[in-house]
Amino acid sequence: MKKLFLFFIAIFMVFMFSCKKENIDNPAKKDTGKLSVSIGLSIEINDVENTLKSTLATENFKVIIYSESGEEILMFDRAVDMPSEIELETGSYYVVAHSDNMLPAAFENPYYYGASEIFTIDKNQNKTITIHCELANCKLTIVYSQNTLDSFTDCIAVVGTVNGSLTFSRDEVRAGYFELEPIAITITLYYATAGGSNTKVLTGNIQAPMPKKHYEVHVDASITDGQMAIEISQDETTEIEIITISEEPQPVEGDIAYGELLITEIMYDPALMSDTYGEWFEIYNNTDENINLENLAILRDGVFVHSVSEALVINPHAYFVLARTDTATAAPDYVYGSSLSLLNTVCELTISNFGTNGSDGAVIATVPYDEGNNFPGAVGASIQLSSLHYNVTDALSGTSWCLSTAVYGKGDLGTPGTANTDCTE
């Protein structure tokens, strides 16, 4: 009997040890939920000739899941390779999807990009999100008038950014797709002379190209009447921009490169002060170097209105407030006065290098705020660029902006001279 008792005691000890070991080898799993992702392709470009490349399949898009803080959690090279449900730990995330073909310049190469809002995965939750991907580069075509084709023996257009270019021959019908950097256009026209041949060179530029836009460059030139012109039209708005031309192109350079300064906050409609006294905007040094703002040019809707007349330095990754009056905020860094009035509905605010006359310098940053372009409407609150989108490309999109919620001054909302939030708080 005693032996039988000892046997049961031994069996019990083995059982307890096994349970304990199982608990050690299999610690409690963290709470998880499941995520399903679908991708929609939103083509909002009004394609005049219906030549938009249609063979891009969303199942080949790259999909990346990030934590709210921006840490990459999972990546799938092709959406088709994703499982129908993705298990994630509870927490907040966002998802990015894009076609895997981003190039500075290429023919028939539309690049699509989309990002979800930040969402939360709760314990045992099945979450479904849809990412809408839109054209994230711009499209450009060259159209020669019949007058040009009859007058010149050949026409060659070179179009590009600092990172890449395309050459459009006389008979090129393909569309070029370009990154959202300033685009330079040089068109060389060849014609016969008694002594052989000669050329005329026309130049133009698109200082702040926009995503989802189709820029149609119209070239009209004649040898006999001496008149030449380049017109650039955006087919979505039918707005026509006349481009200044020169036979010997001399692009105006600038000390401050595109995107080294960002426009990060705009107060265009204060409620507790009149616009005349309370308007201001904020810029941010997006580099690791000091930047001298002397001769910084300010443009509204493409028209030069003011240049900074003092040698003012903005430190690396620092903010700088430019205001209409010295009472607009507690301590603006610079007062531009009545030369600039910020419109309350649709307005394009640009900062650029001065160039030769303030209107022809290289663009540094542009914000085309407009409620119709997804920018938030603001009365008594500034619009602020999300801290998650501190780059010159995202700043062009209204979805990267939100209303300020912090109180300053007499009670309006804004963060003049201090860091923005991530627009999810």
Image (cartoon, grey):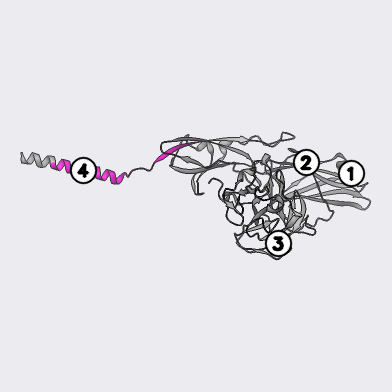
Q: Which quadrant of the figure has residue 56?
A: top right
Residue 30: % across, % down: 38, 43
Q: Amino acid at mark 4?
A: Met
C-beta proximity under 8 Å, tags 3 and 4: no
**Does residue 323 appear anywhere in the picture?**
yes
Q: Sequence order check: which comes first, mark 1 or mark 4? A: 4
- The question of residue 56 being in magenta is answered with no
Closest to the camera, between mark 1 and mark 4, is 4
Residue 26 is left or right of residue 401, and the answer is left
Picture disc at residue 151: 1
252 or 164: nearer the viewer? 252
Q: Sequence order check: which comes first, mark 3 or mark 4? A: 4
- The question of residue 19 being in magenta is answered with yes
Where is mark 2, residue-wise? 239
Q: CA distance from mark 3 to mark 4?
A: 75 Å
Where is mark 4, residue-wise? 16
**Mark 2 residue element:** loop
Q: CA distance from mark 2 to mark 3?
A: 31 Å
Q: Is residue 365 above or below residue 115?
A: below
Closest to the camera, between mark 1 and mark 3, is 3
Q: Give the magenta-colored segment's residue range.
A: 9-37
Closest to the camera, between mark 2 and mark 4, is 2
> Callout 1 environment at 10 Å: few (<14), some (14 to 19), or many (20+)?
some
Q: Amino acid at mark 2?
A: Glu
Picture disc at residue 255: 3
**Does residue 75 appear anywhere in the picture?**
no
**Mark 3 residue element:** loop
Q: Sequence order check: which comes first, mark 2 or mark 4? A: 4
Q: Sequence order check: which comes first, mark 2 or mark 3? A: 2
Q: CA distance from mark 2 to mark 4?
A: 80 Å
**Hey, which residue is sitting farthest bottom in the picture?**
311
